Amino acid sequence: MARRTVPLNQQGIEKLPNDKPDAYRIQTASGRTRHVGLAERGRDQERLEERFPGAEDAVPGAKVQIEQMRSLAEAQDREARVISRARPPYDERGTWPGERPG
């Protein structure tokens, strides 16, 4: 499906398409994944604003990459695969596969 990368700021996220569900990655300037998330159709901008500096769930990053999917289930699957592979430090999932909590 379609993939697009923009700066992680208001002007950047306003350029993102929001007509399909997507999995998104907040990345450093060098492309290292800091957080992986999911946005339902029409909620991209709202979800990403929750990650801006100063927000309660802020994630430091320079850019965001979205990957549009045909369905929410497909986006959830993509999110899970990227999380298991990239192991982003600001992910909300808690423990990684095969690890025990605390």
Image (cartoon, rainbow, N blue to C red):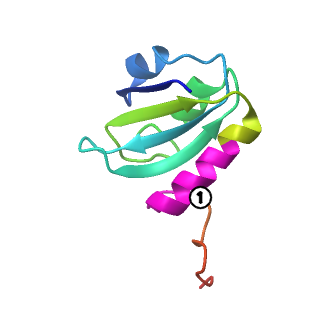
Please give the name of the residue rendered at 62% of the width and 82% of the height, measured from the top-left corner. Answer: 101
Q: Secondary structure at mark 1?
A: loop
Report crowding for label 1: few under 14, some 14 to 19, many 20 or more residues within 10 A (C-alpha). few
* Residue 72 falls in image quadrant: top right
Q: Residue furthest front?
A: 1
Please give the name of the residue rendered at 37% of the width and 47% of the height, measured from the top-left corner. Answer: 60
Please give the name of the residue rendered at 35% of the width and 34% of the height, measured from the top-left corner. Answer: 63
Residue 91 left/right relative to 101: left
Q: Quadrant of the C terminus?
A: bottom right
x, y (%) of residue 82?
Answer: 52, 52
Q: Is residue 36 above or below residue 91?
A: above
Q: Is residue 62 above or below residue 35?
A: above
Name the residue that disc number 1 marks.
Answer: 92
Q: Is residue 11 magenta?
A: no
Closer-to-camera residue (59/32): 32
* Residue 29 falls in image quadrant: top left
Per the rendered image, the range of residues in magenta is: 76-92
Query: Looking at the image, can residue 57 be seen?
Result: no
Residue 1 left/right relative to 72: left
Looking at numbered disc 1 in the image, what kind of residue is underneath it? Glu
Q: Is residue 85 magenta?
A: yes
Prevailing secondary structure class for the magenta stretch in the rendered image: helix
x, y (%) of residue 70?
Answer: 70, 27
Query: Looking at the image, can residue 93 be seen?
Result: yes
Please give the name of the residue rendered at 52% of the width and 38% of the height, measured from the top-left corner. Answer: 24
x, y (%) of residue 35?
Answer: 47, 50
Callout count:
1
Q: Quadrant of the N terminus?
A: top right
x, y (%) of residue 94?
Answer: 60, 68
